[in-house]
Image (cartoon, grey):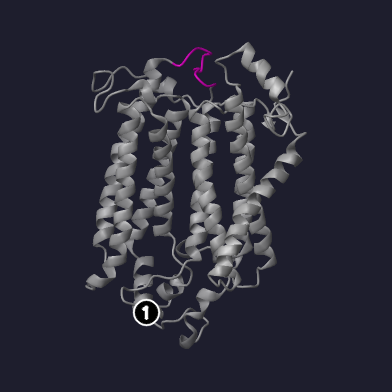
Amino acid sequence: MLDLINLNPAVEVALLGAALAVLPAAWVLRRGRQQGLQGWPAWQRVLTVATLFLTLDLVVFGAFTRLTDSGLGCPDWPGCYGELSPVQAHGDISAAQAALPGGPVTHGKAWIEMLHRYLATGVGALITGLMLLAWRMRHAGGLSPWWATATFVWVCAQGAFGALTVTLKLQPIIVTGHLLGAVLGVAMLTAQVRVLSPRLRMPGDAGAVGDATDTLDAAWAGAGLRRVGLAVLLLLVVQIASGAWVSTNYAVLACTEFPTCQGQWWPDTDFRAGFQLLRVLGGDSEAGYLTLAGLTAIHLAHRCLAVVVALALAIYAWRLGRWQVGGDSGSARPWRREAQVLAGLLVWQLASGLSNVVLGWPLVAALAHTLGAAMLVAWLVRLWVLPRGAVGHLVHAGTGAPQGQHPTARHHGRHQGHHPGDAHPAAS
């Protein structure tokens, strides 16, 4: 009997992931030197940006793995039949494929699954490296190393979910949790990049940070619209969970037309069966099969919630595009750009979502929908989180200087490292 958890190749997989992580790290090092980066905060930011980019790639490739039914392409973890690669496991894969040609184990699916694991291990190695560097350089002005440590804990938890995905045979609640965990990672890395980013500048600012910039930072930090954005973000996460539940239960094709479903506005549904969380893939709580009514309930719930989320995003983008500090129309320009990107991502999501329904769930549309969801989360996090230093100007706007600093040194704080107690929402 095959052991579902076989740690024999674990060290080899980890070493391969570390080797893969060297490639983007070397590229960042080369580019950073060409651009003349100086100081640990600048290097920390570009390394985190590279890790964020690869994490987005990992989210999309994870969706590709799921949508090509390759999640059990190698039925054990972390290797493939106890080996590092499908090449070494060729005989076992061939035997499984011959016994069940249309089953979950084929050579192609094995390679897709293992490539996903290699990429995940590479991202994990980058995050581990960032954590070690953050602790080593903790007095050099970068973010507190606890940020990188939290991200390291996250990637370990994601690895555990990956193992459970295999051992529990793609149980929907586990796969959904794995996807939500991936989105959480995107949010965490985006927040770190944002905190390390330059502070907002007024149009026409030649680079010097002055009173106008302080006003813009402080006004947005205390704006009610910014807090509304957090509420929209949380609503979006609920919708992503709903979409993951649709995908992991293969409920997309329960409705193949829009705006109706199965030729009706509201066909037969079984929400109790559809939203029974603890069950096997394709089954119900009574060891039977999940009915069409259950699948329809899952699909329609996602479709109805999509209307609410789309309206919330559209209204938020519209309000964001009109937001300005006092009567200064120039201060609205940066936010118009932010609003335009947000609106563009919303259109992307609506188009890819509708394409999944009316075009029969094409792979390209499904991957685009997953990427769009991750990008929306990243953009809303980017809007909510502020570059460090803005909170001091909000709290101490009367003096123009963060507490404990002389006014002439009010901008020096943006070059300093955070400490574990600095995780205020406005600077997180």
State whether residue 414 is above or below residue 144.
below
Circle 1 — which element?
A: loop
Q: Residue at point 31% right, 73% down?
A: 203
Tell me where residue 189 appears, x and y as whole percent. 52, 54
Q: Determine the residue located farthest toward the right in the rendered image.
A: 8
Counting from the top left corner in percent of width and height, residue 184 is at 51, 47
The image position of residue 336, as x and y in percent, is 28, 61
Position of residue 322 in the picture relative to residue 156 (left or right): left
Tell me: 245 left or right of 98: left
Tell me how many marks there are. Answer: 1
Query: Looking at the picture, how far across and down is residue 52, in whole percent?
Result: 52, 53
Range of residues picked out in magenta: 280-290
> Which residue corresponds to the image point at 31% horizontal and 65% vertical from the top-left?
334
**Residue plotted at (27% across, 44% down):** 311
Vertical comparison of 50 with 286: above or below: below
Which residue is located at x 33 percent, y 74 percent?
202
The residue labelled by disc 1 is 206
Q: Residue 286: say if magenta.
A: yes
Residue 140 versus residue 323 in the image, above or below: below
Residue 325 visible in rendering: no
Q: Is residue 348 left or right of residue 123?
A: left
| Helix, strand or loop: magenta stretch | loop
| Image quarter (top left, top right, bottom left or bottom right) of the N terminus | top right
Label 1 crowd (10 A; few <14 / some 14-19 / many >=20): few
Q: Is residue 102 magenta?
A: no
Disc 1 marks which amino acid?
Ala
Of residues 159 and 57, the one drawn nearer to the viewer in this rendering: 57
The front one of 287 and 53 is 53
Residue 316 visible from this viewpoint: yes
